[in-house]
């Protein structure tokens, strides 16, 4: 499988991911070792904590710093695409800057569901991002929320929307994770992969292990589906490979 990692925290000093540029470069190297050809740098963005201009300029500075480090070290690295993991807040769908948070070259936005009880506003925001803003929502690691019955009820409602699901590589590597994914599979939504790597240890890049586990436990059919989805939705990212 040609691996594209759609969720990572590799940029230095942006969030709870890479703490410095040395770690960032090592994480890129680790991604390359996993066979990742393209990696999305999706630093956390919280619209209620940071202005968009502060976020975008910090992201650009961190990106340039990382590129400089890579060139200085003369190491091979996967192509980097800028994006953001955007925390869903009330009113987010009306923010005029929403497009600037999409994966570069696409109209796809990675949305993280809130870590608070989900009110009816969550559905309305998702719907408005899709319908009023004409963006495609890629839901970050929905499998994380399936353990709670009241979340499952809401997720079932959200799944009526044309969402894409970003599954964390980790989830394929444990039996409990795979059981949750089997439930999630019933929603019949397109799946895409992300490592959600934050560091080099507990939350490292493990995309190739996940690719092996997908084939072993879910079969070649799912591998091919994920490949097709990646090609289809991230067509622009494959052009230079
Ligand atoms: Fe993340």
Image: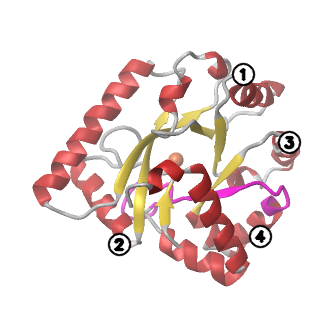
Q: Earlier in the sequence, mark 3 or mark 1?
A: 1
Q: Is mark 2 within 8 Å of ligand 1?
A: no
In this image, 92 relative to 127: left or right?
A: left
SS assignment at label 3: loop
Residue 217 rendering spot, x and y as whole percentages: 70, 81
Q: Is mark 4 within 8 Å of ligand 1?
A: no
Marks 4 and 2: which is nearer the front? 2
Q: How many marks do you count on the picture?
A: 4
Residue sitting at x 30%, y 44%: 12
Q: Earlier in the sequence, mark 3 or mark 4?
A: 3
Asked if the residue at tag 2 contacts the one at tag 4, i.e. Cβ–Cβ closer than 8 Å, the answer is no
**Residue behind mark 3:** 160
Near-viewer residue (192 or 230): 230
Residue 132 numbered mark, or none: 1
**Mark 2 neighbour class, 10 Å CA radius: few under 14, some 14 to 19, many 20 or more:** some
Q: Which residues are magenta?
A: 184-203
Residue 155 rendering spot, x and y as whole percentages: 81, 44
Q: Give the distance between the C-alpha atoms of the residues marked 1 and 4, in whole angstroms.
A: 35 Å
**Residue behind mark 4:** 179
Residue 33 numbered mark, or none: 2
Q: Earlier in the sequence, mark 2 or mark 3?
A: 2
């Amino acid at each position: 499988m040609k691996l594209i990692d759609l969720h990572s925290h590799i940029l230095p000093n942006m969030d709870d991911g890479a703490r410095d540029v040395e770690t960032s470069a090592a994480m890129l190297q680790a991604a390359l070792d996993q066979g990742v050809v393209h990696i999305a740098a999706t630093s956390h963005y919280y619209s209620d904590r940071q202005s968009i201009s502060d976020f975008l300029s910090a992201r650009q500075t961190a990106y340039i710093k990382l590129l400089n480090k890579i060139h200085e070290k003369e190491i091979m690295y996967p192509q980097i695409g800028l994006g953001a993991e955007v925390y869903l807040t009330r009113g987010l769908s009306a923010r005029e800057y929403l497009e600037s948070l999409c994966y570069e070259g696409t109209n796809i936005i990675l949305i993280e569901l809130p870590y608070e009880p989900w009110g009816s506003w969550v559905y309305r925001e998702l719907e408005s991002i899709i319908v009023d803003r004409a963006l495609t929502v890629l839901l970050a690691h929905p499998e994380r929320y399936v353990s709670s019955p009241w979340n499952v009820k809401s997720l079932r409602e959200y799944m009526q929307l044309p969402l894409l699901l970003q599954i964390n590589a980790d989830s394929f590597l444990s039996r409990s994770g795979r059981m949750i994914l089997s439930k999630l599979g019933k929603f019949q939504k397109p799946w895409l992969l992300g490592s959600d790597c934050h560091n080099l240890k507990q939350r490292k890049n493990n995309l190739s292990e996940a690719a092996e586990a997908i084939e072993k436990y879910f079969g070649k059919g799912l591998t091919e589906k994920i490949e097709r989805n990646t090609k289809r939705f991230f067509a622009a990212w494959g052009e230079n490979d």
